[in-house]
Amino acid sequence: MIKKALILIIFLYFLVLLETSFFVHFGFFKWIPNTVFLFLIIFNILESPKKNLGLYLAAAGGLLTDIFSVGFIGFNALVFLTAALLLKFILRRYVRIPLFEKP
Amino acid sequence: MKKISFKKNNFLVLLAVPVLVIVLLNIFQAEVRGFFYWFSSPVQQVFWQAGDKTADFFQGVFSFACLQSRLEELEQKNQGLIAEIIRLEELKKENDSLRQALGVGLQEEHGLMTAKVISKDMSDDVILIDKGLKNGVVQGMSVITEQKLLIGKVAEVFEKYSKIMLISHKEMSFDVKIKQEGKDISAVAQGQGDSCVDLNLIPREQEIFQGDIVVTSSLGGVFPESFLVGTIKSFERSDVDPFQSARLENSFSASELKTLFIIND
């Protein structure tokens, strides 16, 4: 679990670097998708609703985004964590079919 | 009873630790960010250059279809520019002789320092450059390109890196002049975010045109005089308002910037 989390945090770190230095060159009508946020959303959907790794990753991804942005450190962490919590809550409470869960 | 208090304590610790971490990160944000920039800048520089080259390649591929019309357009523009060059060469000769007489060069005039772009902020019009406190960068310094095109000003300085607030940033506001033959019209440029800059407070009685050149004015003390800001793309005039407004055609794209100059006086 810890090893997996560390690998994913390193992946998120490189995703933030790509976002700030590589993807900025490829805006679609000046719009650049937030790949870190997209990855976290997809990860939280695909992860089993009972597991919490997605929540920790959301906080870590948010903090990394904050460090490479301007302004208050913690803002994106809070936004990402809230989104992940909301997603987990919906999946735990309202989604009964284990679409992505391994049997 | 003991179980409940243990749970309560556990919850408080779980809540207090992240809050404390965030508070500490914000207190030492210059050091934290500086460390991460120092640690990541070699990779970011590679990504920036790779992104720039890849974007150039794809731009070439996608614009292939309209190359013919673009070529014709550029040929026409080129003819106009040749005439302009001849006129400017005369002015340059005059300018050079005046500079020689005064003993001042462009470098000495402004005291320029070169810097490379490393990354761009995801949500704001802010870029990161590889010069900081150690190189003598101070908050508020103006940043331009090789072509004397205004980019922005230094917003935040770290030990080896600095953040540049682009002129299109929402918090950016500065005095400008609209250059017209024989006269200058004063206005205020206001960043709108997403690489957009608007001009406000243009007196209604003044006539402005699409393509008018806009340069900085030293009036507000934000930027030095006569740096190119852009050209007028469109304008709005209302019978009710005492002022008219205009939108600028930005002459640069943040993702295309490579080498910049910081004016250190």
Image (spheres, coloured by chain):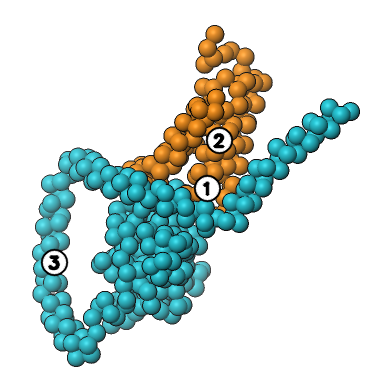
Foreground label between 3 and 1:
1
Residue B90 position by quadrant: bottom left
x and y, in percent, of residue B264 in the image: 37, 74
For disc 3, the marked residue is: B80
Considering every residue shown, the one lying at the far top of the view is A103
Mark 1 residue element: helix
Circle 1 crowding by C-alpha within 10 Å: few under 14, some 14–19, many from 20: many
Cα distance, mark 3 to mark 1? Answer: 48 Å
Look at label 3 and name its amino acid: Gly
Vertical placement of residue A31 versus B113, above or below: above
Circles 2, 1 touching at the beta carbon (< 8 Å) = no
Task: Please tell me which residue is depicted at 52% across the width and 53% down the height of the picture.
Answer: B32
Question: Mark 2 falls within which chain?
Answer: A
Mark 3 residue element: helix
* Camera sees residue B205: no
Look at label 1 and name its amino acid: Asp
Question: Tell me, what hue is chain A?
Answer: orange
Task: Please tell me which residue is depicted at 49% across the width and 73% down the height of the picture.
Answer: B242
Q: Which residue is nearer to you in this view: A1 or A100?
A: A1
